[in-house]
């Protein structure tokens, strides 16, 4: 039924997974510049969003979708402006609702590649319900959440990821709300792809966005992003160049969890608890370390709760599963019903049930 | 079926009636809605004109035998054209004391009362506060009472099927139905077929229901308590092919038809809410029509997903009732701002807040028109009868697509669940719906408007070269970029308003039933149509100078509305709210319209509107008791402020 959805469909538009990629050979080669819109970027100078935008534009040509088949949908907040700067289709919607709007778009148009750009307030506070349900339905949408642990656009109130006791304009005596772990929420909501990266780690961010773009199904990427105006240095303790190798754990599927400048530290399970160990000390070898498995929910749950200073902060792909997507299942049901009952006949439908004729 | 040979009773007399109104009443678990629906189908298929009023509690199973648990189904069937389910029943079927108590007040003296006397146990009587059994204490003298031991007789008919007492008890509604079929000389074949289809996998249950039905029928045949049977001949409806239809059914069919006529897939995002959910249930079964249904996590996601689908080129729509419409308001404002086609259904119910979820009301009009931030115009249509719901579902989409605008389609609980015979339209007669579809690159701007409709182009993702960004921020005229320019904002507000106002040139003028000028115009909208029309007909028959006009378009109003309301000395506006259309008409046209406003969760009766219209025609003062159920308490004046507070 998809061909009747849209008369304007690009001839490259296919159906479901890999549709865009399949058409790569016929497409002109696109570059980052093709994805830069004519609008002036208006984030504060020094904002982490610039880097996220640049990496996003950089990875877009890699997916093989013609740019008219890519849509960026956002909610409200500083992150919400990103679609204006992408030379694709874009929809700057209302606070927290971008995942809902993306769900309808993807259901109607399985051929599109859809991205949702959101922030910690937009996704986890006002839009928490939509985030959870779009993830659990495995809607084939890439959600990139900029987490700066503050409300920036409204000038500095506490967010759902702000640390307990944080003094902000709305919490002069410190917040009394415990923060949430975005990764744990995504995991509880059964997202099929969950990852984390950092705005200033451009290479890692690029790699992470590339993996996210290639995934089919609900994709959640948390980007730790610095708001240099209202929450400067929120992640500095472990993201600064001098310390990051010792304080962050870069996840590699199937590889032991090793970190540190000298690659000598690792995560080991002690009974049920993770602990940081040093390879070569107390008889610890690489074989003792936990091996990352992107399909293991218990490892993912543990990773979602590791945080500096008790642990290195994990970045990379936490979870990656293959599951049928919402639009696939929706369209499969339509195809099955059509096969079983034939294409709907309006005349028959209107006259269904008990009828009678008046002469 | 009972096996003993039926005795040969004296044949009861046959009496022909023009119209009969029956109310079935029992526990909400007694199957009264099903009983009423089956009788309705049978009467409709026989060729009567029919009108129904299902009246049920929000509780699925309130405590058995309690007053809040009483469920009723009133239907009127007639050999002439009718517009309402009847002011009051001629026959009340009461399955227990609670049903009797809750409904007796509406049964006129002399009316027939058929009761299941087995249910009048001391326990059931006590539950609803009967000190003595009304069946035996002489208190029902003014009615024509038929005591039938329905439970006992039904139990006997089902002996030997090996069913539990509970299973047997669940079929007693069909005994009552069978008895009514006998009383009104109706054929049981349709219901027998329905039972066979419904219980095809449980033959013992099918058999039990059929036995109950036939036992009821045979009881009528063999007993001698009924001295008359009644015949209501077929009505002279316009020639054509008919079916029985409720407002919600016609609404769902109309949307499927609109999708076919426009050649775009329907996307229906919805969150369960009474009384709109049945539209979702029905559409969910039409997958082979390309209909995509989405049960969202909440009302906001339901409209959000619909907007997303429309953005992608599908026909995105959502439905709810008042509380859900409130939740959708912000997203509806977004759809106004981004000017995408969208249809929002509001099946109104009693409010405010949760109110009375299964009861009808028309009090969302101002919410729909004005319940959003800023000036945020949407088109609003409102069908008047269950059958019209089909036509206006298509019309809502015609306007949404042509003008690139959200359209709100207003129904209500009475319209949604009430049924009438529906003249099935010929599909070939349905006009196709033109769909804007911008693909041309040259001269494309997201907010460049059509010179006639003022609609902006629909350029959907996937169209090469038309990549653009839209959103809730104010847009520069034509270019569509974000703009904070003061003059631009003022201009865009005016453009949005002018676009909707311009629809007035594209809709039929307000039609008047009766003289085109005179003493009194009764103006209504929505489901009050039937009661108003009948009241006006009655008064016209007495020679009164009275007319009826019914608004199907609430925004914009038909272009001649002002001329129509000014052509009469008085204008009466009955509404099941506290005066919302009245306020609009008074404000827009500066006329002294008089409201008739009752919000009892029930449709108007013909008689009350007739009395009110008659009062205005005669120039009598209004008696307040006719409007308010009981007088409100006298307000005690607050002490005057002393000026030295604090």
Image: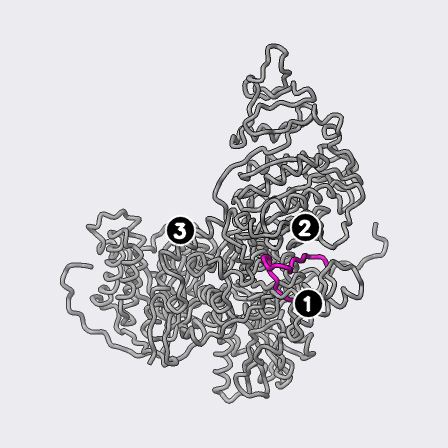
Q: Pointer 2 and pointer 1: residues touching (CB < 8 Å)?
A: no
Q: Could you tell me residue B443's position as x and y percent?
A: 68, 67
Magenta range? B457-474
Q: Quadrant of the C terminus of chain A?
A: bottom left
Q: Is residue A62 above or below residue B292?
A: above
Check if residue B462 falls in the magenta segment. yes
Mark 3, other Cα within 10 Å: few <14 / some 14–19 / many ≥20: some
Q: Image quadrant of residue B461? A: bottom right
Residue corresponding to mark 2: A35
Check the residue under mark 1 and report the chain it is in.
Answer: B
Q: Residue at x 61, y 44 (%)?
A: A62
Check if residue A225 falls in the magenta segment. no
Q: Residue at x 43, y 75 (%)?
A: B428
Q: Image quadrant of residue A8? A: bottom right
Secondary structure of the residue carrying numbered label 3: loop
Secondary structure of the residue carrying numbered label 1: loop
Q: Is residue B614 visible?
A: no
Rendered image: mark on residue B443: 1
Residue corresponding to mark 3: B64
In the displayed image of the protein, which residue is found farthest to the right?
A: B644
Q: Main secondary structure of the magenta part?
A: loop
Q: Residue at x 61, y 59 (%)?
A: B464
- Same chain for mark 1 and mark 3? The answer is yes
**Mark 1 to mark 3 CA distance (whole Å):** 69 Å
Observer-nearest of A294 and B527: A294
**Mark 2 to mark 3 CA distance (whole Å):** 66 Å
Q: Is residue B400 above or below residue B67?
A: below
Q: Could you tell me residue A252's position as x and y percent?
A: 59, 29
């Amino acid at each position: 039924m998809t061909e009747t959805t849209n008369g304007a469909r690009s001839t490259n538009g296919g159906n479901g997974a890999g549709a865009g990629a399949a058409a790569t050979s016929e497409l002109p080669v696109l570059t980052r510049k093709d994805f830069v819109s004519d609008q002036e970027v208006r984030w504060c100078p020094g904002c982490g969003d610039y880097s996220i935008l640049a990496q996003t534009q950089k990875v877009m040509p890699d997916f093989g979708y013609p740019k008219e088949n890519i849509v960026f949908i956002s909610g409200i907040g500083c992150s919400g402006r990103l679609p204006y700067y992408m030379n694709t289709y874009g929809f700057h919607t209302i606070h927290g609702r971008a995942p809902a709007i993306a769900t309808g778009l993807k259901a109607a148009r399985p051929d599109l590649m859809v991205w949702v750009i959101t922030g910690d307030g937009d996704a986890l506070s006002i839009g928490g319900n939509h985030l959870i349900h779009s993830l659990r339905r495995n809607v084939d949408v890439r959600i990139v959440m900029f987490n700066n642990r503050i409300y920036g656009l409204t000038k500095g109130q506490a967010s759902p990821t702000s640390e307990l006791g944080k003094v902000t304009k709305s919490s002069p005596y410190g917040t009394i709300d415990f923060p949430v772990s975005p990764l744990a929420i995504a995991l509880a909501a059964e997202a099929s792809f969950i990852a984390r990266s950092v705005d200033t780690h451009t290479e890692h961010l690029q790699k992470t966005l590339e993996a996210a773009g290639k995934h089919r199904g609900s994709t959640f990427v948390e980007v730790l992003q610095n708001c240099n105006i209202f929450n400067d240095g929120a992640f500095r303790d472990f993201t600064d160049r001098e310390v990051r190798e010792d304080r962050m754990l870069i996840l590699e599927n199937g590889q032991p969890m090793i970190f540190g400048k000298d690659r000598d530290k690792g995560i080991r399970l002690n009974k049920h608890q993770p602990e940081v160990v040093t390879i070569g000390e107390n008889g610890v070898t690489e074989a003792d370390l936990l091996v990352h498995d992107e399909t293991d929910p218990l490892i993912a749950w543990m990773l979602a709760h590791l945080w500096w200073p008790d642990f290195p902060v994990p970045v990379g792909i936490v979870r990656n599963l293959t599951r049928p997507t919402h639009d696939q299942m929706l369209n499969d049901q339509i195809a099955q019903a059509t096969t079983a009952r034939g294409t709907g006949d309006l005349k028959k439908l209107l006259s269904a049930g008990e009828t009678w004729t008046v002469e | 079926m009972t096996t003993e040979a039926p005795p040969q009773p004296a044949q009861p007399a046959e009496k022909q009636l023009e119209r009969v109104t029956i109310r079935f009443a029992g526990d909400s678990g007694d199957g009264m809605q099903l009983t009423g629906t089956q009788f309705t189908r049978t009467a409709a298929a026989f060729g009567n004109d029919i009108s129904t009023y299902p009246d049920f509690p929000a509780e699925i199973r309130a405590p058995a035998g309690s007053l809040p648990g009483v469920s009723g189904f009133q239907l009127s069937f007639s050999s002439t054209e009718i517009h309402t389910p009847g002011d009051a029943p001629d026959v009340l079927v009461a399955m227990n004391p609670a049903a009797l108590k809750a409904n007796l007040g509406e049964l006129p003296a002399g009316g027939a009362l058929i009761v299941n006397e087995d249910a009048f146990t001391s326990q059931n009587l006590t539950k609803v506060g009967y000190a003595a059994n009304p069946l035996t204490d002489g208190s029902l003298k003014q009615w024509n009472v038929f005591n039938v031991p329905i439970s006992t007789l039904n139990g006997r008919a089902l002996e030997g099927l090996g069913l539990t007492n509970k299973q047997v008890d669940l079929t007693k509604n069909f005994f009552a139905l069978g008895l009514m079929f006998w009383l009104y000389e109706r054929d049981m074949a349709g219901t027998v077929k329905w039972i066979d289809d419904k219980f095809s996998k449980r033959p013992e249950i099918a058999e039990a229901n059929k036995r109950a039905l036939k036992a009821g029928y045979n009881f009528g045949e063999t007993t001698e308590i009924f001295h008359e049977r009644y015949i209501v001949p077929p009505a002279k409806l316009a020639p054509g092919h008919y079916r029985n239809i409720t407002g919600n059914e016609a609404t769902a069919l109309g949307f499927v038809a609109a999708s076919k006529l426009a050649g775009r897939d329907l996307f229906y995002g919805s969150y369960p809410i009474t009384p709109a959910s049945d539209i979702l249930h029905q559409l969910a079964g039409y997958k082979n029509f390309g209909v995509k249904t989405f049960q969202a996590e909440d009302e906001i996601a339901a409209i959000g997903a619909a907007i997303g689908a429309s953005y992608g080129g599908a026909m995105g729509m959502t439905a709810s009732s008042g509380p859900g419409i409130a939740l959708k308001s912000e997203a509806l404002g977004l759809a106004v701002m981004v000017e995408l086609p969208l249809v929002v259904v509001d099946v109104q119910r009693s409010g405010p807040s949760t109110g009375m979820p299964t009861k009808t009301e028309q009090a969302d009009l101002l919410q729909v028109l004005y319940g959003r931030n800023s000036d945020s115009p949407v088109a609003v249509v409102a069908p008047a009868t269950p059958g019209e719901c089909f036509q206006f579902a298509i019309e809502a989409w015609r306007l949404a697509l042509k003008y690139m605008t959200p359209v709100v389609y207003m129904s209500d609980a009475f319209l949604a669940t009430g049924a009438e015979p529906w003249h099935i339209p010929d599909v070939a007669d349905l006009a196709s719906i033109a769909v804007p579809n911008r693909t041309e690159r040259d001269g494309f701007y997201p907010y460049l408007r059509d010179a006639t409709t003022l609609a902006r182009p629909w350029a959907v993702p996937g169209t090469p070269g038309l990549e653009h960004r839209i959103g809730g921020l104010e847009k520069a005229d034509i270019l569509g970029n974000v703009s904070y320019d003061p003059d631009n904002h003022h201009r865009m507000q005016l453009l949005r308003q002018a676009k909707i106002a311009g629809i007035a040139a594209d809709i039929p003028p307000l039609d008047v039933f009766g003289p085109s000028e005179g003493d009194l115009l009764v103006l209504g909208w929505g489901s009050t149509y039937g009661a108003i029309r009948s009241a006006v007909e009655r008064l016209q028959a007495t020679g009164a100078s009275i007319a009826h006009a019914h608004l199907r378009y609430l925004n914009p109003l038909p272009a001649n509305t002002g001329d129509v309301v000014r052509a009469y000395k008085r204008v009466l506006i009955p509404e099941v709210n506290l005066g919302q259309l009245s306020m609009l008409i008074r404000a827009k046209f500066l006329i002294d319209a008089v409201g008739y406003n009752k919000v009892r969760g029930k449709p108007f009766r013909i008689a009350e509107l007739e009395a009110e219209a008659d009062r205005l025609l005669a120039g009598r003062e209004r008696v307040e008791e006719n409007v308010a159920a009981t007088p409100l308490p006298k307000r005690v004046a607050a002490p005057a402020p002393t000026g030295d507070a604090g």
